[in-house]
Amino acid sequence: MANLANTQDLVTIEDIHESTVILKGGAMRQVLMVSGLNFALKSENEQNVITSSYQNFLNSLDFPLQIIIHSRKINIEKYLADLEERVQKEESALLQSQIGEYKEFVTGFVKENDIMAKTFFIVVPWAPVSLPSKETVSKFLPFVKKKGGAAEEKAERERQQSFEQNSGQLKQRVAQVIEGLRTIDLEAEVLNDEQLIELYYNFYNPETIEKKGIPIQTVGSSKIQ
């Protein structure tokens, strides 16, 4: 009987540092959250302009992108709790009644219909020219701290310099992508460490957690690599 793989072996992420996802092997990723665009409501001419701009944007890139539509069932328990709190604090009997009726309507609607939200992500990759082996990957990870003398301090500086050099290349790509998206009237924001941790946790645990606290209102439907 074959041994079951360790959970950590199935996760390709080594660490998350300075808004950068560092994969096992030293490759890096930054994740952009991108605003949506209601294409169907645009006129035919506007649609043609958007399509042409999008094609030009993709053709301007000399590196691959991963584009993800992230769908999630929204947890509205806190919203319902806030409504109940407003009912208790409201002095007007009429407003109390209206808020209470609205709360009952929302509660009943959610029981019959899943409330979904979609968020759009673009994953921008960067890999060092020569990827390190598993044994030497720590050279690229500045968060690996070791105790020691001058030799260890020198190694730590080299690791930090290596990370900064490679992350600088990645940031150039990210800036190019953000600028290209602006030509299509799309805004993009680089996810920070906290947002990345929650996003990836949701991807690997889609059945056990609902989004809280950050502007990512979705459940993992695709694996980010």
Image (tube, rainbow, N blue to C red):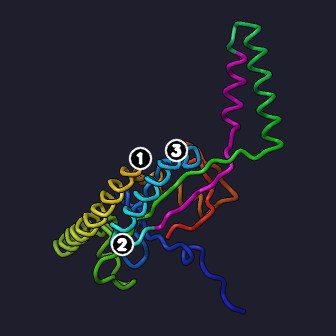
Q: CA distance from mark 1 to mark 3?
A: 20 Å
Pair 2/3: label in front: 2
Residues rendered magenta in the picture: 66-88
Secondary structure under badge 2?
loop
Q: Position of residue 193 (x, y in %)?
A: 42, 54
Residue 185's disc number:
1
Pair 1/2: label in front: 1
Q: Are marks 1 and 3 in contact (CB under 8 Å)?
A: no
Q: Mark 2 or 3 closer to N-term?
A: 2
Q: Amino acid at mark 2?
A: Phe
Q: Are marks 2 and 3 in contact (CB under 8 Å)?
A: no
The residue shown at (18%, 75%) is: 151
Most distant residue in the top direction: 92
Q: Position of residue 207 (x, y in %)?
A: 70, 58
Secondary structure under badge 3?
loop
Residue 157 appears in which quarter of the rendering? bottom left
